[in-house]
Image (cartoon, helix red, strand yellow):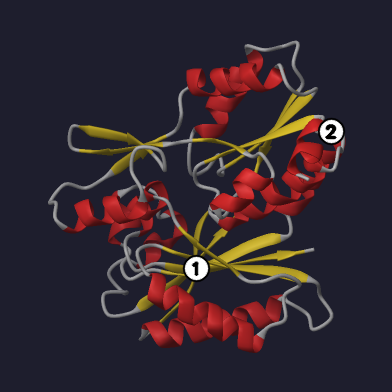
Amino acid sequence: MMQEQTAKRRVAVVTDSTAYLPPHMVNQYAIEVVPLCLMMGDQTWLDGVEIDPPGFYGLLKNSSLFPSTSQPNVAAFDEVYKRLSQQVEGIVSIHISNELSGTIQSARGAAANLPDVPIEIVDSRGTSMTLGFPVLVAAKAAAAGADLPTVAGLAQAATERTHIYFVVDTLEFLHRGGRIGAAAKLLGSALNLKPILEIRDGVVQPVTKVRTRGKALARVYDLLEEQLPPDARYQLAVVNVDAVPGAMQVRDDLAARFRPTEEIMLTECSPVIGAHTGPGTIGVAYFLE
């Protein structure tokens, strides 16, 4: 079956390592993933290639150094685009919000180097599964043989029907990493509180803050209920940063309360996003079909 899908593909779908689709889906739909970079001290790793989440979080717990991240360079996209251009008619490249990373700028630079290959760059205006869901929509269409305008259009439309709420243990990582956005207003007032955040308009925004993690997650469920009408068709995903047991409980809670069209995905954030949100983060993303 996979050979048939690959043989009739007219469009390749590219994303980056902050789209947390399960590996079997990446393989099934032949999604090309360009890794971001993670740095700590004098060490540098390719996200998801040279270091995995358990390895990174182990280092983080035992190090006084604070991690930093950077986008892939133009050369990384050049290699991928040139290789794929020999296999398909066009490329749809969907990436982390331009407000959070320079990844899209690198992708555009590489696309300009290949003027004879049609490449559509899509800004997801998010990351994690608000990037992953549009990538999956595009990849399924590409696997079914859709043309470039169709795949790109579906990806763009999907970015407008995804959202994520997440709860962090501390705002320290977002603050020190420079990705805190409007949530900076919570600094100082959130020492003993659990902030609920979202990515809106491409940046991290505060939603509210409550006194305990349990109450924060309960509030996230209420927010989801407000956004998902009873007759809506939607998918859900739970993402986590070094918090698998808690994420599994959230998945069970969601399964008891909601009726998504597909099994709720459970995914782990890569070190690049984990470096900015910090261990213990749990998020819930939805995609309105």
Which residue is pictured at 12% across the width and 51% down the height?
Answer: 64
Using a 10 Å C-alpha cutoff, classify the residue at mark 2 as few (fewer than 14 neighbours), some (14 to 19) or many (20 or more).
some
Camera-side residue: 244 or 109? Answer: 244
Which residue is pictured at 33% across the width and 71% down the height?
Answer: 169
Which numbered disc, 2 or 1, marks the residue that appears first in the sequence?
2
Q: Is residue 81 left or right of residue 247?
A: right
Quarter of the image that includes the C terminus: bottom right
Which quadrant would residue 8 be assigned to in this image? top right
Q: Could you say which disc has been placed on residue 22 in the image? A: none
Q: Is residue 150 left or right of residue 260?
A: right
Which quadrant would residue 90 be assigned to in this image? top right
**Distance from the alpha carbon under mark 2 to that under mark 1:** 36 Å
Q: Residue 28: percent from the left, percent from the top?
A: 67, 47
Q: Residue 33: percent from the left, percent from the top?
A: 55, 37
Which residue is pictured at 86% across the width and 39% down the height?
Answer: 150
Mark 2 lies on a secondary structure that is: loop
Residue type for callout 2: Lys
Q: Do labels 2 and 1 touch, CB within 8 Å?
A: no
With respect to residue 211, does 95 lie above or below?
A: above
**Residue that numbered label 1 is attached to:** 283
Q: Let me know if residue 201 appears in the view.
A: no
With respect to residue 172, does 11 lie above or below?
A: above
Which residue is pictured at 42% across the width and 43% down the height?
Answer: 48
Mark 1 lies on a secondary structure that is: strand
Q: Let me know if residue 5 appears in the view.
A: yes
**Residue that numbered label 2 is attached to:** 8
Residue type for callout 1: Gly
Total labels: the figure holds 2
Q: Residue 195: percent from the left, percent from the top?
A: 41, 73
Camera-side residue: 2 or 75? Answer: 2
With respect to residue 5, does 205 lie above or below?
A: below
